Image (tube, helix red, strand yellow):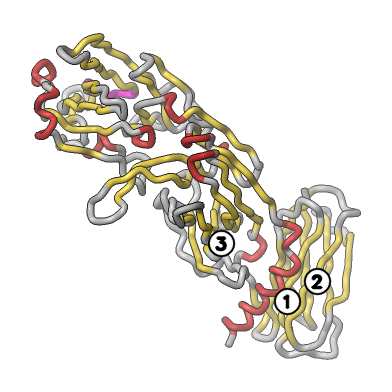
Amino acid sequence: MKKALQIAAFALISLTAAAQQTNVTLSMGANYSNEVYYKLSSGESHTYTAASWDIAFLRNNTFNHGIRVNGGIGIQVFEAANSASDWNNISVADEASWIPLYNDATNWDNGAFMQGSATYGWGEYNPANHHISGSIVFVLKYADGTYRKFINEDYFGEYTFKYATWNGTAWVGETTVTLSNTSNPENRYNYYSLQNNTEVVAEPAENAWDMVFTKYVTDVGGGMFYGVTGALHNPNVTVAKNEEPTGNGNPNGLFYSEEINTIGYDWKTFNGTEYDINSDMAYYIKYDENTVYRLVFESFEGTSTGNLSFNFEDVSGLLGLENITEGVTFGMYPNPSNDKKVNLVYDLKNATAQENLISVYNIQGQLVHTSKVEANNGFFSKTLDLSALQNGMYIVQFKAGNNSISKKLILN
């Protein structure tokens, strides 16, 4: 019964929260030529040319290492040899014997090069100098048929790798590069273009994005790897998804996953003419135990434009909808409030004749707002207009008879 009562309370929230939704339209460009990063809390987006990089190198910690390929632009990685001594013996004629490798679509750091047969994917640990020495020779095959062989020769706080390009008869243009972890210190990865022989920046600072809209390769079932277009999330957030055909959402009691493809690509399906959007599916993006956003996709135009849109809202105020007593449940939403209008939802199961009050205090403890609350049995939603108050932190106290509860509120 309690669960049913809470669902009804959330239904009331949905009626009052529509004005709090933010609509976002982004474009990946025709043929998905761009990767677009987006941050919900700030509304910032960052766009990078998808084909600007070939390989990404994890750089966020001296002891962490990871190498990914840009599978979204059609680069296929193969393990061609399991010994560095075979570097000069690699032949394109042996392609049928090479082992295909793919980025792990659930984890940023488990890239295609980490799938090689060495202990550390591409290399072995050297206890004498604490370096990881490259032992696997890889070949990258591009969508246009170009082949490049690659080996990461060493890692110790920086990556030293070499590569060469097949010109149809021989490997040419052998190049050795050292890419330091100190480059782009606010980013998670450093990027390199083998095609253009240059380091590039292809992502914003790690704390400046929640999800990236991109094309990536994933197992679509039965070991079949295929390029898909969708959203992968920042490892600093977790994501839950929930089917909500009535449009009423509850961020509590959901499983929040670290798998970066929790949003993924299947929020849309192609019907032969255009894309249908699963608008019943809601995604909850959680920053920490106090901040969560609810996102629902609205449109996707496909390869012709790469345009997509979604709505999102801050539902942090619904986290931990609390019981004051067995007879009273109270919640507050949105929090923070950007327009200084706050929706209160409360359930008075056992009404009394006593007066129920909402009181708002500033951080100095001064009472700055008070409102009476309906004392009848049942569910109620009340909107507080706090536009007369300055930006900052406040304490909202809900008092029902002899019981009270206080919650922190931020007005922006």
**In the shown orientation, is residue 171 left or right of residue 179?**
left
Element under label 3? Answer: loop
Disc 1 residue type (three-letter):
Tyr
Q: Main secondary structure of the magenta part?
A: strand
Locate residue 251 relative to residue 23 in the image: left or right: left
Q: Comparing marks 1 and 3, which lies closer to the viewer?
A: 3
Magenta span of residues: 153-157
Q: Give amino acid for label 2.
A: Lys
Please tell me whether residue 185 is drawn above or below residue 338 in the rendered image: above
Residue 104 in the image: state x and y as whole percent: 31, 44
Classify mark 2: residues with Cα within 10 Å, few (<14), some (14-19) or many (20+): some
Q: Label 3: few (<14), some or many (≥20) within 10 Å? A: some
Q: Are marks 1 and 2 in contact (CB under 8 Å)?
A: yes
Q: Could one spot residue 65 in this view of the protein? A: no
Q: Could you tell me which residue is drawn at 31 percent across and 38 percent down? A: 111
Label 3: which residue? 279
Q: Which one is earlier in the sequence, the residue at label 3 or at label 2?
A: 3
- Cα distance, mark 1 to mark 3? 28 Å
- Give the residue type at disc 3: Ser
Dividing the picture into quadrants, the one containing residue 75 is top left
Which residue is at a point 24% across and 16% down the rendered structure image?
Answer: 165
Instruction: Pick out the residue farthest to the front.
Output: 273
Circle nearer the N terminus (1, 3): 3
Q: Position of residue 32 (x, y in %)?
A: 48, 36
> Which residue bears the numbered disc 1?
346
Could you give the CA–CA distance between mark 1 and mark 2, rounded to whole angstroms?
A: 8 Å
Image point (43%, 51%), residue name: 264
Which sits in the foreground, 337 or 392? 337
Please name whichever residue, 373 or 104, is drawn nearer the observer in this view of the structure: 104
Judged from the image, the secondary structure of the residue bearing numbered disc 1 is strand
Residue 382: give its label.
2
